[in-house]
Image (cartoon, rainbow, N blue to C red):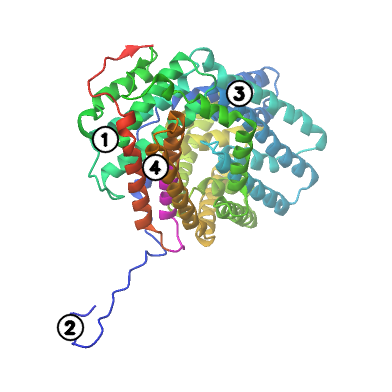
């Protein structure tokens, strides 16, 4: 506006609010920065090696290494479900095995019926989109849909006859059954391991929040707000893990008590004499994560032991109506109004464009471009851009590693098998530090798999992979920018309404002296879940392009009000003022 003063009698010009730009800046250096490895990185790494070594060596012994792609499809299922309690992991990994076999069956049948590259690319793109939506809706990742797309796309371009398909599927299901056993084997040694890790993460996040709670009226950018959001997500994940863990045991009862203390630490950090001690929370987390007994914290004041139990909520979820509600929620995530639909359209268009462009340029393996494009699509444009940089850098470095290791792999079939197993382990060991670092190991493994069917010219393999990577990444990200996701803001508005309802329900139960303790527990957990969903929806929409302005003020106000309501439960559920001893179960 001009600095000229407004003349008397002339209405002042009201300054219009500035809308956020339709196109936001994209990060570069931060996308490639290494982070600390996951606390469970070795579990999927070891699982996939163990699940692969038996089928690989069996095929080596009978001289049929050409069938290794079929068994690898089942062995890779061991990568899934490592964050789930074993009761749910059994169902999840079984579903992964069946889904892998279904995608492989579609690809093999299509490959046996047609040799048209155009049809094969179309089917590959459609399968990639369906696999992306199903994995996102069921939240089965990591590694999500990329493994499914890798297997189904590779099978599309392998010569096939109808009579061979039952044998290939039998090998996949057999290897998948063994992978299922590998994924569940740790339950024989430590059946509450996933629950203990989830609760330890909640305690650690609550300790960070208790140490730096931030100002009372926080903004979305201040560290205290980030700590509260992270603690809320960790506590919610711990409750969900305990709900899905199966029948109560003494260890799980102690874990429930620990989550109550973690919850109290983040809902009202630094609130007077009953404030949580960060060092005590960290000590509990260390003992919970360890192999010894689970610490037994004291009861929160004004509560009874049965308040820590979640048996009633677990019974509701397992009842017929609870299962129906879960199915309805899944169908809503897959329905016509789902926010996942634009991402599915991006995947379909991007994979198809990548495949057709590579085919037009005469590249012999367009399925690599399909997989590259499919791997880019994340929750929003910003995250997809990050993945584009990571995938491109990782693949280009990976072909250099492949060129160096190829002579070693050709010493003998056993050397080839060992190289594949090594890179399978390295990929999972490195990928939690950054996706591009894991891709450095994934790329040579994918290229070495082709060697099981016979030796190929190294220059041809490297050249095709470089071209497919660059074209797949470019066309894939182009599709992400052209296909808008205006439903991201709509998801925020729906999450705001759900948070308002959950907060009102929690306030009613807190104010009602006749409310049952289990009802208050349920309302508080529902409010925490709604706040986690709200923050996830807000973060997703903030990284999206071409959409209307976000209701940022309402979002911040809803988060503040929700955390105030949670804090109102602290006098009933807060930790004791004195420092308790850390007992053993």
Disc 2 secondary structure class:
loop
Q: Residue at coordinates 28% horizontally, 50% vertically from top-left?
A: 219
Magenta residues (range): 532-548
Label annotation for residue 179: 3
The percent position of residue 209, horizontal first and vertical second, equals: 28, 35
- Residue 13 horizontal side relative to residue 530, left or right: left
**Comparing marks 2 and 3, which lies closer to the viewer?**
2
For marks 4 and 2 on the same chain, the one whose residue lies earlier in the sequence:
2
Q: Identify the residue under disc 1.
A: 269
Tell us which disc is closer to us: 1 or 2: 1
Name the mark on residue 194.
none
The mark closer to the camera, 1 or 3, is 1
Discs 4, 3 touching: Cβ within 8 Å = no
Kindly report the distance in space between the C-alpha atoms of the residues bearing marks 2 and 3. 75 Å
Expressed as whole percent of the image width and height from the top left, the position of residue 370 reads 60, 48
Would you say residue 240 is visible in this rendering? yes
Q: Which residue sits at x=64%, y=56%?
A: 356
**The N terminus is located in which quarter?**
bottom left
- Location of residue 572 (image quadrant): top left
- Mark 4, residue position: 507
């Amino acid at each position: 506006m001009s600095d000229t003063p407004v003349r008397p009698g002339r209405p002042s010009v009201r300054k219009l609010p500035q809308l956020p730009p339709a196109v936001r800046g994209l990060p570069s250096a931060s996308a490639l920065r290494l982070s600390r490895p996951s606390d469970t990185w070795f579990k999927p790494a070891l699982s996939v090696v163990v699940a692969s070594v038996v089928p690989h060596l069996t095929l080596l012994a009978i001289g049929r290494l050409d069938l290794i792609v079929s068994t690898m499809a089942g062995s890779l299922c061991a990568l899934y479900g490592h964050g789930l309690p074993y009761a749910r992991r059994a169902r999840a990994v079984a579903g992964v095995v069946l889904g892998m076999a279904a995608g492989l069956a579609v690809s093999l049948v299509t490959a046996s019926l047609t040799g048209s590259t155009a049809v094969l690319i179309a089917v590959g793109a459609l399968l990639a989109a369906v696999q992306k939506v199903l994995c996102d809706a069921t939240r089965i990742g990591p590694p999500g849909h990329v493994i499914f797309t890798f297997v189904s796309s590779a099978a599309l371009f392998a010569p096939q006859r109808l009579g061979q398909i039952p044998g290939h599927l039998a090998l996949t299901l057999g290897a998948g059954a063994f992978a299922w056993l590998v994924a569940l084997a740790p339950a024989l040694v430590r059946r509450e391991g996933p629950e203990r890790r989830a609760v330890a993460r909640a305690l650690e996040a609550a300790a960070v929040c208790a140490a730096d709670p931030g100002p009372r009226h926080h903004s979305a950018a201040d560290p205290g707000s980030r700590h509260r959001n992270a603690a809320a997500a960790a506590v919610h994940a711990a409750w969900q893990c305990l709900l899905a863990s199966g029948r109560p045991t003494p260890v799980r009862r102690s874990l429930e008590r620990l989550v109550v203390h973690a919850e109290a630490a983040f809902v009202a950090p630094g609130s007077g004499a009953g404030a949580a001690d960060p060092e005590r929370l960290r000590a509990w987390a260390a003992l919970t994560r360890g192999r010894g007994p689970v610490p037994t914290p004291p009861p929160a004041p004004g509560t009874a032991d049965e308040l820590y139990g979640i048996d009633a909520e677990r019974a509701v979820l397992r009842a017929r109506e609870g299962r129906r509600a879960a199915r309805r929620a899944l169908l809503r995530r897959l329905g016509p109004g789902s926010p996942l639909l634009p991402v599915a359209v991006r995947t379909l268009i991007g994979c198809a464009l990548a495949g057709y462009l590579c085919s037009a340029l005469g590249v012999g393996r367009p399925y690599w471009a399909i997989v590259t494009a499919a791997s880019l699509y994340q929750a929003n444009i910003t995250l997809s851009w990050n993945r584009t940089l990571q995938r491109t850098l990782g693949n280009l470095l990976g072909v250099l590693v492949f060129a160096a290791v190829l002579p070693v792999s050709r010493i003998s079939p056993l050397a080839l098998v060992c190289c594949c197993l090594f890179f399978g382990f390295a990929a999972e060991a490195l990928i939690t530090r950054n996706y591009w670092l894991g891709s450095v190991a994934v790329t040579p493994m994918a290229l070495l798999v082709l060697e099981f069917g016979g030796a190929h010219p190294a220059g041809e393999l490297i050249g095709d992979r470089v071209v497919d990577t660059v074209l797949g990444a470019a066309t894939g990200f182009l599709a992400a920018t052209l296909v808008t996701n205006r439903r991201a803001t709509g998801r925020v508005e729906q999450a705001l309404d759900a948070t308002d309802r959950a907060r009102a329900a929690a306030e009613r139960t807190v104010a009602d002296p006749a409310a049952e303790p289990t009802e208050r527990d349920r309302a508080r957990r529902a409010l925490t879940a709604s706040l986690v969903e709200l923050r996830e929806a807000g973060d997703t929409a903030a990284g999206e392009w071409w959409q209307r302005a976000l209701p940022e003020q309402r979002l911040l106000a809803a988060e503040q009000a929700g955390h105030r309501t949670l804090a109102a439960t602290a006098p009933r559920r807060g930790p004791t003022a004195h420092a308790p001893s850390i007992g053993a179960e």
